[in-house]
Image (cartoon, rainbow, N blue to C red):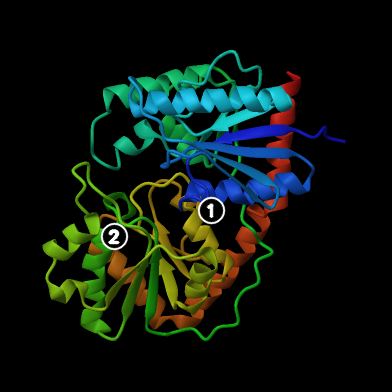
Amino acid sequence: MVKPLNLVFISSEYPLWYPGGFGTFLQTIGRELVKKNHKVSVVGPGTSKVAEYLEDEGVRLYRLPKTKGRFPDFMQNAIQINKKLKELQTEEPIDIIEASELGLALISKKHSAKKVIRLHGGHHFFSEAEKRGINWRKGLLEKRSFKNADAFIAVSNYVKMHTQKYLSYHNKPIEIINYPIDTTLVIPEIQIKEDRILFAGTVCEKKGIRQLIEAFKILKQKRPEMILDVFGRDWFYPDGSSYMEMLKSTYDESYLENVIFHGSVERDVLNTKYAEALFCIFPSRMETQGLVSLEAMLLKKPVIFSEYGPGPETISHMETGLLCDVYDPNDIAEKMIWCIENPEKAKELGEKGNEVVRKKYEKQFILDKNIAFYTQLINE
């Protein structure tokens, strides 16, 4: 029998705080760990001057106060996080401290817990897709964080291989463990809207929304009745300007006609929208795994995903979904038209995609792999 573990995850994302794929993962795995009698805390910097404490089905959430001092914000946040970790350690010894790529850079080495980095996609990883250079400070901190880690978990083989082009794992243990999916989700009994196509994700360049809008215009030449529903929060440039507003100012009405930007919505609402859609499309340029694709596949939706990155790990083309060239609007449009003109075959892809998700990403199966990895690390 596995000894109950005391785990602390460092993150500013959690559905009760702020939307995001990392937060969704934490909620899913955190709740399941608690059900297995493990202790789970999530510690992250907040935006208020007042500390906040919440509980989510046994997961303890500590949102730390935003403080001002003589150090930059990232250092002030590190001071607050280290202080909270020390406090939690006095309550009960921490077994595992887990963070994403940058998260361990300024964590005190005095903490006796094993420190794990889960590769969700860091600064080096996304630099290529975003066509930008490495910020010297973030790059230095990420290297420091990797050096401070005792072990690594990669959510796909792709993120493992792509990250090691830039950063060293220092010959420390690394395991590939996919994101868990709540396969107990009941599929809503909802009438499919034959004219609705769904995209979900942050509205930004790396998610491929610009090429999707261009592809959608090509699609409308054949099927002018189709509607593209876009769910996800806006992205902002360093100067504070909106990516969504950039799209609206760049493209004329002929491109954006029948494109509806809904913003972020609650998970239950999004699941309903998945179920209503004829098919879902996620033409992302770079992903670590592609959580939204799996969520849609679970709901038996035909899914169009990227032929690059982790796409081929997630979907077998023409067997469990479709893969497209995310840089080519014509290819994206071609795949969308196929789904519309071959409804029975597309439905079959959705059914097979559902089977794969239920088998490969089932949360108890993934949970057991995480616990085994943690336990082995602690016992080394």
Q: Which residue lies furthest to the front in this view?
A: 50
Q: Residue 97's spot in the image, x, y percent?
A: 61, 28
Tell me the kind of residue under disc 2: Ile
Q: Nearer the viewer, mark 1 or mark 2?
A: 1
- For residue 256, what is the image quadrant? bottom left
- Label 1 SS: loop
The relative height of residue 248 versus residue 162 in the rendered view (above or below) is below
Asked whether residue 173 is in view, the answer is no
Q: Residue furthest right?
A: 1
Q: Which mark is residue 16?
A: 1
Q: How crowded is mark 1: few (under 14 residues within 10 Å), some or many (20 or more)?
A: few
- For residue 354, what is the image quadrant? bottom right
Q: Residue 183's spot in the image, x, y percent?
A: 66, 61
Q: Residue 360's spot in the image, x, y percent?
A: 64, 53
Residue under the image location 59 percent in, 20 percent down: 150
Mark-to-mark CA distance, 1 and 2: 26 Å
Query: Foreground residue, 144 or 288?
Result: 144
Query: Foreground residue, 215 or 182?
Result: 182
Question: Does the residue at mark 1 contact the one at mark 2 (Cβ under 8 Å)?
Answer: no
Residue under the image location 27 percent in, 42 percent down: 130
Q: Which residue lies furthest to the top in this view?
A: 110
Q: Quadrant of the N terminus?
A: top right
- Label 2 SS: helix
The relative height of residue 97 versus residue 279 in the rendered view (above or below) is above
Q: Quadrant of the C terminus?
A: top right
Tell me the kind of residue under disc 1: Leu
Q: Residue 6 carries which label?
A: none
Image side of residue 211 versus residue 44, left or right: left
Query: Foreground residue, 330 or 378?
Result: 378
| Residue occupied by mark 2 | 209
